[in-house]
Structure formats: structure tokens, C-alpha cells
Image: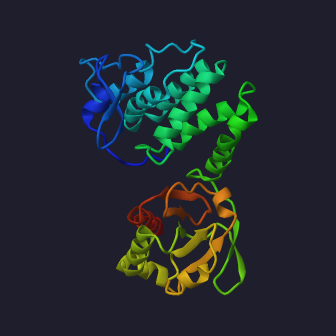
């Protein structure tokens, strides 16, 4: 599982709220909107001691009070919040416990297209989208597979999820990513083919975080030395470039490979800017991350292996 490492407060998932406690959905400068929870969130029994055991208990019992047979829609914001609380202990439960819980939920949803779509939206919000605290592609893909395979959901409602499903499957850690064509600043077309230890940064040279990442990779002694020795290949790609993009790459390090691609955003999971992929010498994705520090560390560790 590819998990974004943000540690939630202990009480958020091990002793979550009693029935009737308000859920903060949106805030403005003038007011707070309160939404009642869908059901009373369970609390792991006190006699269960370890963090993993408490988390796995919640994986098994969190949705016990929810009626999966109801035919009408639930409040989506309230469901998003319930799924948010449910998703936090996934970080400490075993992979088997998380997937078993996920499969049990989906089995309860396959004949209920209304709730299947709502749960997929909640999973997207909490495991994939820009507001997610936890990225777990393997779990989200199970919801996508169920929704895409449902004959009771219209193609129009499926369209965006079909695209996500394809892109995520192309981009799973441990798989070989697709090749793609990119234009270099001097007008030559090249094709990226996995096979060298490579850090790919997908970004925009004008964004602040991308400039920071460029500076980090270019000035870090260990990383820049590995690039100079040919141990690490660095590729900077602008997805869906605008006119005159070539000018913005003029000051990038000469040892880097730079360019732009119109097709890459339809092939790779690019959920933020910048976004980094570390590709191993076997052609497989070692890691994908928002963090330039994590990308550099992953690549340097791969050299040692």
C-alpha cells in the first residue's frame, strides 16, 4: 500500500465520538456548518491493548451500525466524515485486515448502486483526492473496480472513475509504468522507457514548490553527486504544456533530461504539482510521492541495494 504519512491524533480513531457530536464539514469566517453523524462511531474495547489490534477491531466493526440495505441516499458529507474516521486506523492495521474490511463493505454495496456510488465518492475524498489525509491506492482501486463493473450505474456517472481506474493501475508501486513520448526543448521527440534508476518530476517550472524541488535536487551533495556519476537519471516533465514552455527550462541542470508531454497526464497518476516517481533499474515503480526529499532518499537507498 502506498500511504501518505500524516499521523492523526490518537483519539481520532481509537476513541471516536459519541452519537450526536457535531461533525465539522465546512467553515467560513462567519459560521460553522454542523452535520449530524450517520451513526454512533464505535470505540475499540479497553481490554484491547495494542495499536494494531485496536485498529483491526475497528476495521472489522466500524460499520456494524450502518444499514447497507437502505435504498435511499445518505448525506454525502456525513458519509465522507464517517469514512474519514474509518480510514485513519488503516495506517496501523495489517494489510490483510484492511483489505478484508474493504471487500466486506463492497460485497454489501454491489447490489445497491446508490450507496456504491456514494461510498466510492467517500473513498475518493479520503484516500485519493486533494483533501485526503491517507493515500491507499490498493483500497481505492477496489471501490473503482466495483463501480466500473456495475451494470446499474450509467456510463456518464462512471466516466471519471474509469479514467482514475486506468491511471491508478498504470501507476501502482511495484508495477512497470507506461512509456511516454515527450518533446525536448530543442524540438526533438524522445521516449521514456523504464530501465535506469530514474527520478521523474512532473511539474511546472513556474510553481514555487517545483522551483524548491529543483534547488533541492541540484544542491544536495549526495544526490547531485549520484547524478553526476550516472547512478541516478533525473527527468523533469511538464504535463499538458502551454506555449513557450521551452524558455522555462533554459536554466535547468544540463545533466537532467527535460521536456513536455501532452499524453502523460492520461497515463500517470499526477495528483499534485510537483509529483515524483522513482523508477528502479528493473523498470518498476519504487515509490511515488509529493515530497522531493522522499524521492531523493528513495533513489539514494536504491543505489545501495
| Image position of 244 with respect to 289: above or below | below
Q: Give the x, y percent position of residue 252.
A: 50, 83
Q: How is the image coloured?
A: rainbow
Which residue occupies the extreme front position in the image? 30
Mark count:
0
Residue depicted at x 65% and y 23%: 113
* Residue 29 position by quadrant: top left
Q: Give the x, y percent position of residue 97.
A: 46, 28
Residue depicted at x 71% and y 28%: 153
* Residue 65 position by quadrant: top left
98 sits left or right of 166 in the view = left
| Image position of 119 with respect to 108: above or below | below
| Image position of 111 with respect to 197: above or below | above
| Image position of 101 with respect to 257: above or below | above
Front position in the image: 4 or 271: 271
44 sits left or right of 205 in the view = left
71 sits left or right of 221 in the view = right
Residue depicted at x 53% and y 39%: 124
Q: Give the x, y percent position of residue 74.
A: 51, 21
109 sits left or right of 209 in the view = right
Res. 99 visible in picture: yes
Res. 267 visible in picture: no
Front position in the image: 18 or 88: 18
Q: Give the x, y percent position of residue 282.
A: 61, 63
Front position in the image: 102 or 71: 71
Amino acid at each position: 500500500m502506498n500511504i501518505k504519512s500524516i499521523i492523526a491524533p490518537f483519539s481520532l480513531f481509537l476513541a471516536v465520538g459519541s452519537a450526536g457530536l457535531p461533525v465539522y464539514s465546512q467553515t467560513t469566517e462567519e459560521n460553522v456548518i454542523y452535520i449530524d453523524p450517520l451513526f454512533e462511531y464505535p470505540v475499540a474495547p479497553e481490554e484491547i491493548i495494542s495499536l494494531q489490534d485496536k485498529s483491526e477491531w475497528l476495521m472489522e466493526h466500524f460499520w456494524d451500525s450502518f444499514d447497507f440495505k437502505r435504498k435511499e441516499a445518505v448525506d454525502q458529507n456525513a458519509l465522507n466524515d464517517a469514512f474519514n474516521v474509518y480510514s485513519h486506523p488503516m495506517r496501523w492495521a495489517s494489510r490483510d485486515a484492511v483489505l478484508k474490511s474493504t471487500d466486506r463493505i463492497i460485497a454489501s454495496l454491489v447490489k445497491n448502486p446508490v450507496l456504491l456510488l456514494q461510498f466510492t465518492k467517500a473513498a475518493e475524498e479520503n484516500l485519493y483526492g486533494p483533501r485526503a489525509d491517507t493515500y491507499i491506492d490498493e483500497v481505492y482501486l477496489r471501490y473503482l473496480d466495483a463501480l466500473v463493473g456495475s451494470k446499474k450505474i450509467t456510463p456518464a456517472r462512471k466516466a471519471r472513475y474509469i479514467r482514475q481506474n486506468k491511471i491508478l493501475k498504470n501507476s501502482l508501486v511495484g508495477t512497470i509504468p507506461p512509456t511516454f513520448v515527450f518533446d525536448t526543448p530543442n524540438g526533438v521527440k524522445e521516449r521514456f522507457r523504464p530501465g535506469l534508476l530514474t527520478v521523474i518530476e512532473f511539474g511546472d517550472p513556474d510553481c514555487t514548490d517545483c522551483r524548491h524541488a529543483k534547488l533541492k535536487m541540484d544542491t544536495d551533495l549526495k544526490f547531485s553527486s549520484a547524478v553526476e556519476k550516472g547512478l541516478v537519471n533525473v527527468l523533469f516533465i511538464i504535463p499538458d504544456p502551454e506555449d513557450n514552455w521551452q524558455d522555462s527550462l533554459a536554466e535547468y541542470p544540463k545533466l537532467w533530461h527535460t521536456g513536455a508531454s501532452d499524453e502523460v497526464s492520461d497515463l500517470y497518476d499526477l495528483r499534485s504539482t510537483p509529483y515524483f516517481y522513482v523508477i528502479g533499474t528493473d523498470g518498476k515503480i519504487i515509490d511515488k510521492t509529493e515530497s522531493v526529499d522522499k524521492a531523493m532518499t528513495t533513489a539514494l537507498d536504491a543505489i545501495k541495494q
